[in-house]
Image (spheres, rainbow, N blue to C red):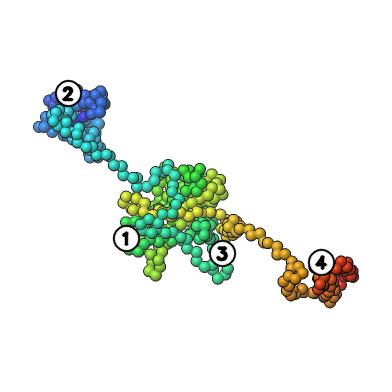
């Protein structure tokens, strides 16, 4: 039997070796990957007929014999040293040399290429994917917007279906609906919500909560333990995780309520887009990922943009107006030429607000009609006329505005 001990235990074990008649060899075991010995590990040879644990217990007064935990932590590395150093034999022996035929066969045998399994989820330093991916389970996400109250009060949030963007106030519970294909077993699946930045130059930066809102004495944080998370969930089984400052919240996938096709979970945001030291006016996205609970493999992904502000409806209307102006293509109207002599004519109505305005418009009409008749070519004459100058009758002065009204 062989045991490995440290140098600071050597004086006690030397005395134990002299009293019990056990041979202590100061042989130093060498590491398997290096030929140099490790001076902190000593090899102690002992025959099988000695009661080693009881002898060590009696000769080491530093240990409390009544404390089983203290005793077990000390003796276990001495009795079972191979477990710590992953040595499956009692001695480190070099394997026997292989025969020439075996070496030749090993050289000719094909070597299988090592296969690397893809990671279950993206590394924290990687750029998060924001593209929609329903996956095999047809995973979908939307925000439920119930009708406004009868009193005319607006909801503290609004969702734009066209832009897939949520406008909400801070610390407002927003119902997010999840949908999967029919026949999916939800017990082995979970939904992970991760806030990320949309711009590529900020995508690798973790979303942090500002110093004011993460203060433990803030009114928002009464009775809460996840002070650093920007996104909270009101699900009773919500799990908050952090991986290199990339924080996320996971909720289990459940079956929809009877009579509904969606599974709804309430989420709320604990920091605003304008908070200095936090989001700091950067465009915020929330990536919802459908994952397997055991392996963490992603099965679907959807992302929506979020703006946390004090006036969600005002910002929503401003963005919709801006978006409509960008989509609207200006059309230049062509000016239709006025019909000349012999052209198509029609009847047009002009509204007159007073008798004086009516009389003036009638006089203008008569004058213009006489002008057209004088310019019209007579039968058998030149189309431009017989050369007789056309005399226009001078109209009276335009009545004053008071007379027209």
How many residues crowd mark 2 within 10 Å: few (<14), some (14–19), many (20+)? Answer: few
Q: Earlier in the sequence, mark 3 or mark 1?
A: 3
Name the residue tied to disc 2.
25
Q: Secondary structure at mark 4?
A: loop
Relative to 88, 214 lies left or right:
right
Q: Earlier in the sequence, mark 4 or mark 2?
A: 2
Which residue is drawn at the image coordinates 42% and 50% (left, top)? Answer: 248
Which residue is drawn at the image coordinates 63% and 58% (left, top)? Answer: 330
Q: Quadrant of the C terminus?
A: bottom right
**Disc 3 versus disc 4: nearer the observer:** 4
**How far is the residue under mark 4 from the one under mark 1?**
90 Å
Name the residue tied to disc 4.
384
Q: Position of residue 115 (x, y in %)?
A: 29, 42
Q: Secondary structure at mark 1?
A: loop
Q: Earlier in the sequence, mark 2 or mark 3?
A: 2
Outermost front residue: 380
Q: Position of residue 343 (x, y in %)?
A: 73, 70
Name the residue tied to disc 1.
185
Relative to 116, 172 lies left or right:
right
């Amino acid at each position: 039997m062989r045991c490995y001990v440290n140098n600071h235990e050597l004086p006690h074990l030397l005395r134990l070796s002299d009293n019990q008649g056990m041979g202590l060899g100061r042989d130093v075991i060498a590491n398997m990957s290096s030929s140099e010995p490790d001076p902190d590990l000593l090899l102690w040879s002992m025959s099988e007929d000695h009661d080693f644990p009881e002898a060590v217990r009696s000769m080491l007064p530093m240990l409390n014999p009544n404390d089983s935990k203290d005793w077990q932590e000390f003796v276990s590395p001495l009795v079972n040293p191979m477990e710590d150093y992953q040595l499956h034999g009692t001695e480190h022996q070099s394997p026997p040399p292989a025969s020439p035929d075996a070496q030749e066969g090993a050289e000719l045998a094909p070597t299988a290429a090592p296969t690397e399994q893809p990671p279950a989820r993206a590394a924290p330093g990687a750029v998060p994917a924001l593209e929609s991916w329903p996956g095999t389970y047809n995973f979908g996400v939307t925000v439920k917007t119930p009708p406004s109250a009868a009193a005319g009060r607006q909801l503290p949030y609004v969702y734009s279906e066209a832009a897939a963007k949520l406008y909400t106030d801070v610390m407002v519970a927003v119902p997010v609906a999840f949908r999967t294909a029919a026949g999916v077993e939800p017990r082995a699946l979970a939904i992970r919500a991760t806030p990320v930045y949309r711009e590529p130059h900020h995508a690798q930066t973790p979303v942090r909560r500002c110093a004011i809102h993460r203060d433990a004495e803030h009114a928002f944080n009464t009775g809460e333990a996840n002070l650093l998370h920007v996104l909270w969930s009101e699900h009773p089984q919500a799990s908050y995780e952090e991986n290199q400052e990339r924080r996320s919240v996971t909720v289990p996938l459940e079956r929809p309520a009877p009579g509904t096709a969606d599974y709804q979970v309430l989420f709320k945001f604990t920091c605003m887009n304008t908070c200095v030291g936090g989001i700091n006016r950067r465009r915020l996205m929330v990536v919802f990922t459908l994952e397997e609970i055991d392996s963490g493999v992603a099965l679907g992904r959807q992302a929506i943009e979020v703006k946390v502000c004090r006036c969600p409806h005002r910002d929503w209307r401003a963005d919709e107006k801006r978006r409509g102006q960008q989509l609207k293509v200006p059309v230049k109207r062509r000016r239709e030429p006025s019909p000349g002599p012999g052209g198509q004519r029609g009847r047009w109505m002009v509204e007159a607000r007073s008798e004086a305005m009516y009389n003036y418009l009638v006089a203008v009409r008569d004058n213009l009609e006489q002008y057209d008749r004088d310019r019209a070519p007579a039968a058998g004459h030149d189309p431009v006329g017989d050369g007789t100058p056309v005399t226009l009758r001078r109209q009276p002065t335009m009545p004053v505005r008071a007379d027209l009204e």
